[in-house]
Amino acid sequence: MRISTSMIFDAGVRSMNTQTASLLQLQQQVASGRRILNPSDDPVNAARALEVTQSQSVIAQFSVNHNNATSSLGLEEAQLTSVTDVLARVRELTVQAGNTTLAASDRKAIAFELRARFDELVGLANATDGGGQYIFSGFMGATKPFGGSVDGIVSGTDPMQYFGDEGQRSLQISPSRFIEVSDSGNDVFMRVRNGNNSFKTGYTSTAGKIDNQGIAMIDGGTVTDPSKWNAAASKNYEIVFSKDNSVVPPKTYYDIVDTDSTLSILTDAPPDPLDFSNQREYISGQPILLKGLSIDLGSSVTVQNAPAEGDSFTISPSSSQSMFETVANLIGALEKTVEVATDGTSSGIARLSMDVGFALNNLDQSTENVLRVRAAIGSRMGEIDSTSGVNEDLDLQYQQTLSQLQDLDYAKTISDLTRKQTDLQAAQQAFVRVSQLSLFNYL
Protein backbone atom coordinates (compact mmCIF):
# COMPACT_ATOMS: atom_id res chain seq x y z
CA MET A 1 0.00 0.00 0.00
CA ARG A 2 1.39 3.37 -0.98
CA ILE A 3 1.12 5.98 1.74
CA SER A 4 1.44 9.59 0.74
CA THR A 5 2.51 12.46 2.90
CA SER A 6 -0.98 13.99 2.74
CA MET A 7 -2.43 10.76 4.10
CA ILE A 8 -0.05 10.88 7.06
CA PHE A 9 -1.05 14.47 7.82
CA ASP A 10 -4.80 13.76 7.45
CA ALA A 11 -4.64 10.68 9.69
CA GLY A 12 -2.69 12.57 12.34
CA VAL A 13 -5.12 15.49 12.39
CA ARG A 14 -8.09 13.13 12.47
CA SER A 15 -6.61 11.20 15.40
CA MET A 16 -5.93 14.37 17.37
CA ASN A 17 -9.44 15.70 16.68
CA THR A 18 -10.95 12.44 17.92
CA GLN A 19 -8.86 12.55 21.08
CA THR A 20 -9.71 16.23 21.59
CA ALA A 21 -13.46 15.55 21.15
CA SER A 22 -13.32 12.74 23.70
CA LEU A 23 -11.40 14.99 26.08
CA LEU A 24 -13.96 17.79 25.62
CA GLN A 25 -16.82 15.35 26.31
CA LEU A 26 -15.20 14.34 29.59
CA GLN A 27 -14.53 17.97 30.51
CA GLN A 28 -18.21 18.88 29.95
CA GLN A 29 -19.33 15.92 32.06
CA VAL A 30 -17.07 16.97 34.90
CA ALA A 31 -18.23 20.61 34.63
CA SER A 32 -21.96 19.72 34.61
CA GLY A 33 -21.82 16.76 36.97
CA ARG A 34 -24.00 14.86 34.51
CA ARG A 35 -23.15 11.61 32.75
CA ILE A 36 -25.75 12.16 30.01
CA LEU A 37 -25.23 15.43 28.15
CA ASN A 38 -27.19 14.47 25.04
CA PRO A 39 -29.86 11.79 24.51
CA SER A 40 -27.45 10.04 22.16
CA ASP A 41 -25.04 9.44 25.04
CA ASP A 42 -27.47 6.89 26.58
CA PRO A 43 -30.87 6.78 24.77
CA VAL A 44 -32.55 4.36 27.22
CA ASN A 45 -31.58 6.13 30.41
CA ALA A 46 -32.13 9.55 28.82
CA ALA A 47 -35.75 8.61 28.07
CA ARG A 48 -36.18 7.25 31.60
CA ALA A 49 -34.67 10.43 33.08
CA LEU A 50 -37.15 12.52 31.06
CA GLU A 51 -40.08 10.52 32.49
CA VAL A 52 -38.79 10.93 36.03
CA THR A 53 -38.23 14.67 35.52
CA GLN A 54 -41.78 15.09 34.28
CA SER A 55 -43.11 13.19 37.31
CA GLN A 56 -40.99 15.40 39.55
CA SER A 57 -42.49 18.51 37.93
CA VAL A 58 -45.99 17.19 38.61
CA ILE A 59 -45.09 16.64 42.27
CA ALA A 60 -43.74 20.20 42.40
CA GLN A 61 -47.10 21.47 41.09
CA PHE A 62 -48.89 19.41 43.73
CA SER A 63 -46.75 21.15 46.35
CA VAL A 64 -47.93 24.51 44.99
CA ASN A 65 -51.52 23.22 45.14
CA HIS A 66 -50.94 22.16 48.75
CA ASN A 67 -49.98 25.70 49.68
CA ASN A 68 -52.94 27.18 47.79
CA ALA A 69 -55.40 24.69 49.32
CA THR A 70 -54.07 25.31 52.82
CA SER A 71 -54.34 29.05 52.28
CA SER A 72 -57.94 28.82 51.01
CA LEU A 73 -59.06 26.51 53.80
CA GLY A 74 -57.27 28.62 56.39
CA LEU A 75 -59.08 31.73 55.16
CA GLU A 76 -62.44 29.96 55.29
CA GLU A 77 -61.66 28.65 58.77
CA ALA A 78 -60.85 32.19 59.93
CA GLN A 79 -64.20 33.45 58.60
CA LEU A 80 -66.12 30.62 60.28
CA THR A 81 -64.29 31.27 63.55
CA SER A 82 -65.61 34.83 63.38
CA VAL A 83 -69.10 33.49 62.60
CA THR A 84 -68.89 31.28 65.70
CA ASP A 85 -67.90 34.31 67.78
CA VAL A 86 -70.82 36.33 66.42
CA LEU A 87 -73.28 33.52 67.18
CA ALA A 88 -71.86 33.25 70.70
CA ARG A 89 -72.46 36.98 71.24
CA VAL A 90 -75.97 36.70 69.80
CA ARG A 91 -76.66 33.86 72.22
CA GLU A 92 -75.48 35.99 75.14
CA LEU A 93 -77.84 38.75 74.08
CA THR A 94 -80.66 36.23 73.64
CA VAL A 95 -80.21 34.91 77.17
CA GLN A 96 -80.20 38.49 78.42
CA ALA A 97 -83.38 39.21 76.47
CA GLY A 98 -85.06 36.25 78.17
CA ASN A 99 -85.25 38.24 81.40
CA THR A 100 -88.99 39.00 81.62
CA THR A 101 -88.39 41.95 83.98
CA LEU A 102 -86.72 43.99 81.24
CA ALA A 103 -88.48 47.11 80.08
CA ALA A 104 -89.47 47.55 76.45
CA SER A 105 -86.63 50.05 76.01
CA ASP A 106 -84.13 47.47 77.29
CA ARG A 107 -85.37 44.88 74.82
CA LYS A 108 -85.15 47.36 71.98
CA ALA A 109 -81.58 48.23 73.00
CA ILE A 110 -80.71 44.52 72.78
CA ALA A 111 -82.47 44.34 69.41
CA PHE A 112 -80.38 47.31 68.23
CA GLU A 113 -77.15 45.45 68.96
CA LEU A 114 -78.59 42.30 67.40
CA ARG A 115 -79.15 44.28 64.20
CA ALA A 116 -75.45 45.15 64.22
CA ARG A 117 -74.53 41.50 64.78
CA PHE A 118 -76.90 40.53 61.93
CA ASP A 119 -75.07 42.91 59.57
CA GLU A 120 -71.74 41.52 60.76
CA LEU A 121 -72.95 38.00 60.07
CA VAL A 122 -74.02 38.95 56.54
CA GLY A 123 -70.62 40.61 55.99
CA LEU A 124 -68.81 37.42 57.00
CA ALA A 125 -71.05 35.34 54.74
CA ASN A 126 -70.20 37.67 51.83
CA ALA A 127 -66.45 37.66 52.51
CA THR A 128 -63.97 37.44 49.64
CA ASP A 129 -60.54 35.89 49.33
CA GLY A 130 -57.37 37.70 48.28
CA GLY A 131 -58.31 37.32 44.62
CA GLY A 132 -61.72 38.97 44.88
CA GLN A 133 -63.65 35.68 44.73
CA TYR A 134 -66.51 35.20 47.21
CA ILE A 135 -65.64 32.38 49.60
CA PHE A 136 -69.15 30.98 50.13
CA SER A 137 -70.68 31.29 46.65
CA GLY A 138 -69.78 27.81 45.41
CA PHE A 139 -68.49 27.72 41.83
CA MET A 140 -69.93 31.21 41.23
CA GLY A 141 -66.98 33.02 42.78
CA ALA A 142 -67.80 36.33 41.13
CA THR A 143 -71.39 36.36 42.47
CA LYS A 144 -72.19 37.95 45.83
CA PRO A 145 -73.83 35.02 47.63
CA PHE A 146 -76.26 36.58 50.12
CA GLY A 147 -78.79 39.39 50.03
CA GLY A 148 -81.62 40.42 52.34
CA SER A 149 -82.43 42.50 55.40
CA VAL A 150 -83.80 42.12 58.92
CA ASP A 151 -87.00 44.02 58.14
CA GLY A 152 -87.49 42.09 54.92
CA ILE A 153 -87.15 38.74 56.72
CA VAL A 154 -89.52 39.73 59.54
CA SER A 155 -92.15 41.06 57.16
CA GLY A 156 -91.63 38.31 54.61
CA THR A 157 -91.24 40.85 51.81
CA ASP A 158 -87.49 40.43 51.35
CA PRO A 159 -86.29 37.12 52.80
CA MET A 160 -82.61 36.32 52.86
CA GLN A 161 -81.65 34.72 49.56
CA TYR A 162 -78.65 32.71 48.43
CA PHE A 163 -77.45 33.54 44.91
CA GLY A 164 -74.54 31.09 44.68
CA ASP A 165 -74.67 27.40 43.86
CA GLU A 166 -74.00 24.13 45.66
CA GLY A 167 -70.51 23.64 44.21
CA GLN A 168 -67.30 23.15 46.16
CA ARG A 169 -64.13 24.39 44.49
CA SER A 170 -61.33 21.82 44.58
CA LEU A 171 -57.62 21.42 43.88
CA GLN A 172 -55.65 18.30 42.97
CA ILE A 173 -53.14 17.51 45.70
CA SER A 174 -51.99 14.09 44.51
CA PRO A 175 -52.28 11.97 41.36
CA SER A 176 -55.55 10.47 42.64
CA ARG A 177 -56.96 13.03 45.11
CA PHE A 178 -58.90 16.24 44.58
CA ILE A 179 -59.68 18.09 47.80
CA GLU A 180 -62.45 20.65 48.38
CA VAL A 181 -61.13 24.10 49.30
CA SER A 182 -64.49 25.84 49.79
CA ASP A 183 -68.00 25.18 51.06
CA SER A 184 -71.37 26.25 49.71
CA GLY A 185 -72.87 29.14 51.64
CA ASN A 186 -76.21 27.38 51.35
CA ASP A 187 -74.81 24.46 53.33
CA VAL A 188 -73.11 26.67 55.93
CA PHE A 189 -75.62 29.46 56.57
CA MET A 190 -78.99 28.48 55.08
CA ARG A 191 -79.45 24.74 55.47
CA VAL A 192 -79.70 24.65 59.27
CA ARG A 193 -82.23 22.35 60.92
CA ASN A 194 -84.51 24.20 63.32
CA GLY A 195 -86.17 22.94 66.49
CA ASN A 196 -84.56 19.89 68.07
CA ASN A 197 -83.46 18.53 64.67
CA SER A 198 -86.50 16.21 64.50
CA PHE A 199 -89.45 18.52 65.12
CA LYS A 200 -90.12 22.08 66.14
CA THR A 201 -92.77 23.45 68.47
CA GLY A 202 -94.69 26.70 68.27
CA TYR A 203 -97.73 28.62 69.45
CA THR A 204 -100.84 29.25 67.38
CA SER A 205 -100.73 32.54 65.51
CA THR A 206 -102.18 31.77 62.09
CA ALA A 207 -105.29 33.26 60.55
CA GLY A 208 -108.53 31.48 61.43
CA LYS A 209 -107.33 30.36 64.84
CA ILE A 210 -107.41 32.05 68.23
CA ASP A 211 -104.02 33.27 69.38
CA ASN A 212 -102.97 31.91 72.73
CA GLN A 213 -104.39 34.03 75.52
CA GLY A 214 -102.87 32.19 78.47
CA ILE A 215 -99.36 32.30 79.87
CA ALA A 216 -98.49 28.69 79.09
CA MET A 217 -95.14 28.08 77.40
CA ILE A 218 -93.90 25.04 75.50
CA ASP A 219 -90.30 23.88 75.29
CA GLY A 220 -88.47 22.55 72.24
CA GLY A 221 -89.44 18.94 72.93
CA THR A 222 -87.40 15.77 73.26
CA VAL A 223 -87.12 12.72 71.02
CA THR A 224 -86.43 9.61 73.09
CA ASP A 225 -86.80 7.10 70.25
CA PRO A 226 -85.86 8.59 66.84
CA SER A 227 -86.85 5.41 65.02
CA LYS A 228 -90.47 5.80 66.14
CA TRP A 229 -90.57 9.47 65.16
CA ASN A 230 -89.04 8.75 61.75
CA ALA A 231 -91.47 5.89 61.13
CA ALA A 232 -94.56 8.01 61.81
CA ALA A 233 -96.76 8.61 58.76
CA SER A 234 -97.78 12.03 60.01
CA LYS A 235 -95.57 14.50 61.82
CA ASN A 236 -97.93 17.46 62.20
CA TYR A 237 -99.79 17.71 65.48
CA GLU A 238 -101.51 20.22 67.67
CA ILE A 239 -101.94 20.15 71.44
CA VAL A 240 -105.27 21.81 72.26
CA PHE A 241 -106.29 22.79 75.81
CA SER A 242 -109.76 22.95 77.29
CA LYS A 243 -111.10 23.66 80.80
CA ASP A 244 -113.62 21.81 82.91
CA ASN A 245 -115.25 24.63 84.86
CA SER A 246 -117.84 22.30 86.43
CA VAL A 247 -115.41 21.31 89.16
CA VAL A 248 -113.76 23.40 91.84
CA PRO A 249 -111.06 24.25 91.27
CA PRO A 250 -111.40 24.01 87.48
CA LYS A 251 -109.22 21.40 85.78
CA THR A 252 -107.35 21.79 82.51
CA TYR A 253 -107.24 19.02 79.92
CA TYR A 254 -105.47 18.59 76.61
CA ASP A 255 -106.01 16.66 73.42
CA ILE A 256 -103.40 15.79 70.76
CA VAL A 257 -104.77 16.23 67.24
CA ASP A 258 -103.20 14.95 64.03
CA THR A 259 -103.62 18.02 61.83
CA ASP A 260 -103.18 15.97 58.66
CA SER A 261 -106.15 13.71 59.46
CA THR A 262 -107.86 16.10 61.96
CA LEU A 263 -108.30 13.10 64.28
CA SER A 264 -107.31 12.91 67.92
CA ILE A 265 -104.49 10.38 68.43
CA LEU A 266 -105.86 9.76 71.94
CA THR A 267 -109.14 8.36 70.59
CA ASP A 268 -108.54 7.89 66.83
CA ALA A 269 -111.72 9.94 66.42
CA PRO A 270 -112.60 13.58 65.79
CA PRO A 271 -111.66 15.66 68.87
CA ASP A 272 -114.43 16.66 71.27
CA PRO A 273 -113.34 19.53 73.55
CA LEU A 274 -116.31 18.90 75.85
CA ASP A 275 -115.60 15.21 76.43
CA PHE A 276 -112.94 15.37 79.14
CA SER A 277 -113.00 11.59 79.63
CA ASN A 278 -111.20 11.19 76.31
CA GLN A 279 -108.56 13.81 77.12
CA ARG A 280 -105.60 13.91 79.46
CA GLU A 281 -105.39 16.12 82.48
CA TYR A 282 -102.79 18.86 82.18
CA ILE A 283 -100.22 19.30 84.95
CA SER A 284 -97.82 22.21 84.54
CA GLY A 285 -94.22 21.08 84.03
CA GLN A 286 -95.08 17.43 83.50
CA PRO A 287 -93.94 15.99 80.13
CA ILE A 288 -96.71 15.46 77.58
CA LEU A 289 -96.09 12.15 75.84
CA LEU A 290 -96.82 12.21 72.11
CA LYS A 291 -98.53 8.85 72.28
CA GLY A 292 -102.05 7.68 71.50
CA LEU A 293 -104.14 4.57 71.04
CA SER A 294 -102.40 3.35 67.92
CA ILE A 295 -99.41 5.64 67.58
CA ASP A 296 -96.26 6.24 69.59
CA LEU A 297 -94.00 9.03 68.33
CA GLY A 298 -91.23 8.28 70.82
CA SER A 299 -91.25 11.96 71.82
CA SER A 300 -92.51 14.35 74.45
CA VAL A 301 -92.90 18.06 75.09
CA THR A 302 -93.20 20.03 78.31
CA VAL A 303 -95.67 22.87 78.87
CA GLN A 304 -95.51 25.15 81.87
CA ASN A 305 -97.90 27.70 83.39
CA ALA A 306 -101.63 28.04 82.81
CA PRO A 307 -103.10 27.83 79.30
CA ALA A 308 -106.38 29.56 78.50
CA GLU A 309 -109.42 27.85 77.04
CA GLY A 310 -108.72 26.99 73.41
CA ASP A 311 -104.98 27.70 73.57
CA SER A 312 -102.89 25.36 71.46
CA PHE A 313 -99.33 24.54 70.52
CA THR A 314 -98.11 23.09 67.25
CA ILE A 315 -95.64 20.33 66.52
CA SER A 316 -94.23 20.02 63.01
CA PRO A 317 -91.18 18.45 61.34
CA SER A 318 -87.89 20.30 61.56
CA SER A 319 -87.03 22.17 58.40
CA SER A 320 -84.16 24.26 57.09
CA GLN A 321 -83.99 27.71 58.61
CA SER A 322 -81.09 30.06 57.93
CA MET A 323 -79.19 31.53 60.83
CA PHE A 324 -80.10 34.93 59.38
CA GLU A 325 -83.79 34.12 59.79
CA THR A 326 -83.20 32.95 63.36
CA VAL A 327 -81.55 36.26 64.32
CA ALA A 328 -84.07 38.37 62.38
CA ASN A 329 -87.06 36.63 63.98
CA LEU A 330 -85.59 37.25 67.42
CA ILE A 331 -85.08 40.92 66.58
CA GLY A 332 -88.70 41.17 65.42
CA ALA A 333 -89.94 39.55 68.63
CA LEU A 334 -87.91 41.92 70.83
CA GLU A 335 -89.08 45.01 68.95
CA LYS A 336 -92.75 44.18 69.40
CA THR A 337 -94.74 46.09 72.02
CA VAL A 338 -95.65 43.67 74.81
CA GLU A 339 -98.70 44.53 76.91
CA VAL A 340 -98.56 43.38 80.53
CA ALA A 341 -101.72 42.91 82.60
CA THR A 342 -102.16 44.59 85.98
CA ASP A 343 -101.55 41.29 87.76
CA GLY A 344 -98.18 40.98 86.09
CA THR A 345 -99.21 38.21 83.70
CA SER A 346 -99.11 38.54 79.96
CA SER A 347 -99.65 36.18 77.06
CA GLY A 348 -97.32 38.50 75.16
CA ILE A 349 -94.56 37.92 77.71
CA ALA A 350 -95.18 34.18 77.41
CA ARG A 351 -94.87 34.34 73.62
CA LEU A 352 -91.71 36.45 73.94
CA SER A 353 -90.22 33.89 76.34
CA MET A 354 -91.03 31.12 73.88
CA ASP A 355 -89.53 33.14 71.00
CA VAL A 356 -86.36 33.49 73.05
CA GLY A 357 -86.37 29.77 73.82
CA PHE A 358 -86.91 28.86 70.16
CA ALA A 359 -84.12 31.27 69.17
CA LEU A 360 -81.71 29.64 71.64
CA ASN A 361 -82.48 26.21 70.19
CA ASN A 362 -81.99 27.43 66.64
CA LEU A 363 -78.80 29.33 67.54
CA ASP A 364 -77.41 26.14 69.02
CA GLN A 365 -78.28 24.32 65.80
CA SER A 366 -76.58 27.09 63.78
CA THR A 367 -73.46 26.89 65.91
CA GLU A 368 -73.45 23.11 65.62
CA ASN A 369 -73.71 23.39 61.85
CA VAL A 370 -70.78 25.82 61.68
CA LEU A 371 -68.72 23.54 63.94
CA ARG A 372 -69.55 20.63 61.63
CA VAL A 373 -68.19 22.56 58.64
CA ARG A 374 -65.12 23.63 60.62
CA ALA A 375 -64.48 20.02 61.59
CA ALA A 376 -64.64 19.05 57.90
CA ILE A 377 -62.16 21.83 57.08
CA GLY A 378 -59.81 20.59 59.78
CA SER A 379 -60.05 17.07 58.40
CA ARG A 380 -59.20 18.31 54.91
CA MET A 381 -56.24 20.34 56.18
CA GLY A 382 -54.97 17.26 58.00
CA GLU A 383 -55.26 15.26 54.78
CA ILE A 384 -53.28 17.94 52.94
CA ASP A 385 -50.50 17.73 55.52
CA SER A 386 -50.46 13.95 55.23
CA THR A 387 -50.42 14.05 51.43
CA SER A 388 -47.69 16.69 51.52
CA GLY A 389 -45.46 14.27 53.44
CA VAL A 390 -46.14 11.52 50.91
CA ASN A 391 -45.30 13.86 48.03
CA GLU A 392 -42.05 14.91 49.71
CA ASP A 393 -41.09 11.24 49.96
CA LEU A 394 -41.93 10.76 46.28
CA ASP A 395 -39.84 13.78 45.32
CA LEU A 396 -36.89 12.35 47.25
CA GLN A 397 -37.27 9.02 45.46
CA TYR A 398 -37.37 10.79 42.09
CA GLN A 399 -34.20 12.70 42.97
CA GLN A 400 -32.47 9.46 43.89
CA THR A 401 -33.60 7.84 40.64
CA LEU A 402 -32.37 10.82 38.60
CA SER A 403 -29.08 10.68 40.44
CA GLN A 404 -28.65 7.04 39.50
CA LEU A 405 -29.56 7.76 35.87
CA GLN A 406 -27.68 11.02 35.28
CA ASP A 407 -25.12 11.78 37.95
CA LEU A 408 -21.44 11.39 37.13
CA ASP A 409 -19.02 8.91 38.66
CA TYR A 410 -16.29 11.48 39.34
CA ALA A 411 -13.58 8.94 40.21
CA LYS A 412 -13.99 7.07 36.94
CA THR A 413 -14.49 10.19 34.81
CA ILE A 414 -11.41 12.00 36.20
CA SER A 415 -9.37 8.87 35.64
CA ASP A 416 -10.65 8.73 32.03
CA LEU A 417 -9.92 12.45 31.64
CA THR A 418 -6.30 11.96 32.74
CA ARG A 419 -5.93 9.00 30.40
CA LYS A 420 -7.38 10.98 27.47
CA GLN A 421 -4.99 13.83 28.17
CA THR A 422 -2.12 11.34 27.98
CA ASP A 423 -3.52 9.86 24.76
CA LEU A 424 -3.81 13.31 23.19
CA GLN A 425 -0.26 14.24 24.19
CA ALA A 426 1.02 10.96 22.73
CA ALA A 427 -0.88 11.57 19.49
CA GLN A 428 0.51 15.08 19.22
CA GLN A 429 4.11 13.98 19.87
CA ALA A 430 3.79 11.06 17.43
CA PHE A 431 2.45 13.41 14.77
CA VAL A 432 5.41 15.71 15.24
CA ARG A 433 7.86 12.82 14.83
CA VAL A 434 6.09 11.31 11.81
CA SER A 435 5.65 14.68 10.10
CA GLN A 436 9.43 15.11 10.15
CA LEU A 437 10.01 11.91 8.17
CA SER A 438 10.84 13.25 4.69
CA LEU A 439 13.56 12.54 2.07
CA PHE A 440 14.14 16.26 1.91
CA ASN A 441 15.77 15.97 5.32
CA TYR A 442 18.62 13.97 3.69
CA LEU A 443 19.42 16.31 0.84
Image: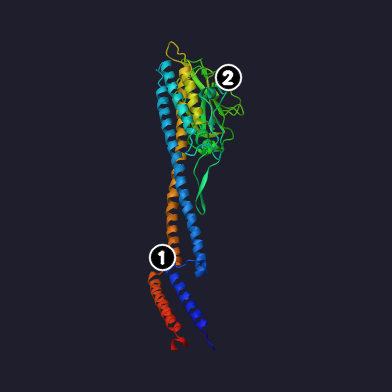
Local secondary structure at mark 2: loop
- Which residue is labeled 1 in the image? 31
Packing grade of label 2 (10 A; few <14, some 14-19, many >=20) is few
Q: Amino acid at mark 2?
A: Lys
Residue 316 location in percent, x, y?
55, 30
Residue 343 location in percent, x, y?
42, 12
Front residue of 381/139: it is: 139
Q: Is residue 374 above or below residue 35?
A: above
- In the displayed structure, does residue 433 sit left or right of residue 275? left
Q: Which mark is residue 221?
A: none
Say whether marks 2 and 1 touch (CB < 8 Å): no
Can residue 210 be seen from the camera position used here?
yes
Residue at far top of view: 342
Q: Quadrant of the C terminus?
A: bottom left
Q: Is residue 45 above or below residue 137?
A: below
Residue 227 location in percent, x, y?
52, 39
* Residue in the image at 52% along x and 20% along y: 311
Q: Quadrant of residue 407?
A: bottom left
Front residue of 113/393: it is: 393
- Which residue is labeled 2 in the image? 209
Q: Amino acid at mark 1?
A: Ala
